[in-house]
Image (tube, rainbow, N blue to C red):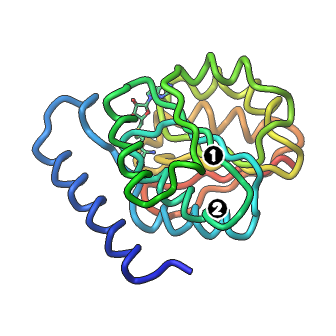
Amino acid sequence: MLSTELFARLTAIWEEGEHHDAVTTERALKNLFITPDTGRFLYQLLRHANPQHVLEIGTSNGYSTLWLALALRDRSGRITSLDVLPAKQQQAARHLQDFALQHKVELHCQDAAAHLRAAADGSVDVVFLDADRSRYVDYWPDLCRILRRGGLIVVDNVLSHAAECADFIRLVLATEGYLAETYQIGKGQFVIVKD
Ligand SMILES: C[S@@+](CC[C@H](N)C(=O)[O-])C[C@H]1O[C@@H](n2cnc3c(N)ncnc32)[C@H](O)[C@@H]1O
């Protein structure tokens, strides 16, 4: 169960992150966290799906990673989380340690395309995609290949950055064997199931 204390600690990290973003001009230095309702949505999905392997693309400072890891804290499932910026992942590692969740997450400072290319077929149960939207179309063949049947992909920002996500959404909707829907949660979640 998520205690009031855990909620309060997550809220404090989110509020500090939002304040940081409000006073930071350089985009690469911003946290760009998911919203708290998106965190609760991801938590619900993972508690229900009980995945063995979750792949997060876009760790940033680990706010979303904390939600994913909390959902699996008393389960056998594990998370791999990717980001290209080491400083952000170092902060994520500190957050995970503060929550005693470091054993649930492997942080890889690696470009998503390289990781996806090397990942085994059907090796991932859930993907949370929250990184470089212009490259999602290129990721799609590998995402299809590595996702197990019945697996889920959740894509953030499809309403906040609709134009940037349009080609990817069109591509997914045109791919046979996948059912996808957009939900008005946070910045817009596009949920894809491999049917
Ligand atoms: C929107 S932020 C992620 C926010 C995080 N999911 C959260 O809510 O706490 C996007 C992150 O993706 C990372 N990123 C951008 N391009 C990437 C790539 N090609 N591979 C892996 N990570 C990438 C950025 O460095 C940035 O930290």
Q: Residue at x 73, y 51 (%)?
A: 180
**Which residue corresponds to mark 1?**
79
36 horizontally vs 177: left or right: left
Locate ligand 1 by image quadrant: top left
Q: Residue at x 18, y 29 (%)?
A: 26
User: Which picture quadrant has residue 119?
Assistant: top right
Relative to 49, say whether 154 is above or below: above
User: Which picture quadrant has residue 124?
Assistant: top right
Residue 92: percent from left, percent from top: 39, 43
Relative to 110, say whether 91 is above or below: below
Amino acid identity at mark 2 = Leu
Residue 73: percent from left, percent from top: 61, 63
Of mark 2 and mark 1, the one earlier in the sequence is 2
Q: Nearer the viewer, residue 82 or 128?
A: 82
Amino acid identity at mark 1 = Ile
Q: Quadrant of the N terminus?
A: bottom right
Q: What label sits on residue 72 in the rendered view? A: 2
